[in-house]
Structures are given as C-alpha cells and as structure tokens.
Image: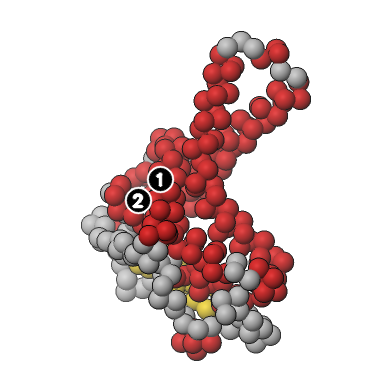
Amino acid sequence: MRPHFRRKALDDVGGWDPHNVTEDADLGLRLHANGYQTGIIRGATVESAPVELGVWLRQRTRWLKGWAQTWLVVMRKPSRTFASLGPAGFTVFQLMIAGMLVSALAHPLMFAFIGLTLAWLASGNVSDLPSAHTALMWLDMTNILGSYLTFGAIGWFGFTAYEKARIQRRWLLLAPAYWLLMSCAGWRALSQLAGHAHLWEKTPHPVDPVIPIANANAPVRPGVSGKRRCETSKTVPNPGGTRLSPMS
C-alpha cells in the first residue's frame, strides 16, 4: 500500500512532517482536518512484507513510534483538534491511534490475567466466588477468545486465494504470539521515543520471486503481469472542507 497525493493538496496541508517516522498517519489527519477525503485505487505493486523477525520488529517499532508522535503532537491542543476533526473523526483518532498503542503496550497484562485465572480455576475455589463475578470472569475470557478469532478472521478473509494457499489456517493459531511481539515492538517504540524519537529504521522490501503465480482472485492491471493487487490511496479535494488543522 502506497499513498499518492495531488501536489496541491500536499502543499495545502503543509507537506510532509520530516520528523515523524510514520508520516502517513500524521498527514492523513491533516488532510482530514483540511477537508480532504481519501479514496482507493486498486493498482499493483511488487512490495512484499517483511519475512524476518528482526526486520518485522523494527518496522512495527517505527509504526508505533510514529503513531505515538502523531498523538502527542495532535493532542497538544485537544480542543482545537476536536474542532478540526469533528466528534466522529476525533473519536476514531483516539480509538485507532491511542487504542492501538495502549493495546500493544498492555497486551502482556492480559496474559497475566489469563494465567492467574487458570491458576485460580485449578485451585478449586470457583464456588467461593459470587455468581456475578464468575459471570464477569467468563465474559472476559470470551471477549479475549473472540478478539483473537476476529483478528484472524479479518486477516483470513482479506487474503487472496494465493496467499491463503501459502499461509494456511494453522498459522492463525499464532495470533497470541503475534500480539506479544507487537507488545515488544510497542515497548521498544516507547523507549526509542524518549531517546531516539526521529530514528528511522529502514525496512527492506525484496521482490517475492513467486509472485507471478498469483491467482485469478488477485487481478492485475494490463501490462503489469506478475504483480499482486494492492490497495493504494489517493487524495480527493473536498471544496466544502475547512482549513483548520490540529497540527498548526
């Protein structure tokens, strides 16, 4: 996924922030605050995702650090941000940016909760707990399981048939391990934010040598054979939008 912008729109919102290591998050907010909308272009790209743990961890660290930078900058003036983004935009911003950061950092606490709960169940003292507390405990456990299942389902149904054939369902069982690694990236991002806020750890994107066998469910543009479908965004001006920006 690569962003594409009309030059005028980019200039209107102040251009790139050279100090933000997740520049598309920062720019997306400023585009929305200035009345622009983003659309989807179904094009083709040969960019592949990281396949090595070290590369993946550095990429996620940079993303989370950039989201933290964006949140800190935008929330310097909360009232102005609220006015610029509107109630819906402000709420989505908090859920997506702050929510992702908090969930990544706090995820190990959930495993501690599960461990303590299982140990308590094994002790045989379930009958000593009031029924309301027991119901709440099982509701929590159901929510945790449902979250993992939802995470896996969203990913699975977003894959092409070619990707499904290579990944297979059994890898979805590693979702808890994936989120633990996300937590590692989150804490790594937090430590970098304090001492190396503008460090940009580059992510190599080697071309996948087997991409040409992509299936018919991943259509490509004429003349670009052997490239997987990718959704990229473009910026479309909204004449009725305002020029307020939370980044000012």
Looking at this view, name the residue that lies furthest to the front: 195
Q: Position of residue 58 (x, y in %)?
A: 33, 55
Instruction: Kindly identify the amino acid type of the residue bearing the numbered disc 2.
Output: Leu
Question: What residue is rendered at 32% in x and 74% in y?
Answer: 223
Instruction: Kindly identify the amino acid type of the residue bearing the numbered disc 1.
Output: Cys
Evaluate if marks 1 and 2 touch, with contact meaning CB atoms under 8 Å apart.
Answer: yes
Q: How many numbered markers are drawn?
A: 2
Can residue 160 be spotted in the picture?
no
Callout in the foreground (1, 2) = 1
Question: What residue is rendered at 57% in x and 56% in y?
Answer: 98
The C terminus lies in quadrant: bottom right
Q: Is residue 16 above or below residue 45?
A: below
Looking at this view, name the residue that lies furthest to the top: 124
Question: What residue is rendered at 38% in x and 60% in y?
Answer: 195
Look at mark 1 in the image and give the residue it sits on.
184
**Tag 1, which secondary structure?**
helix
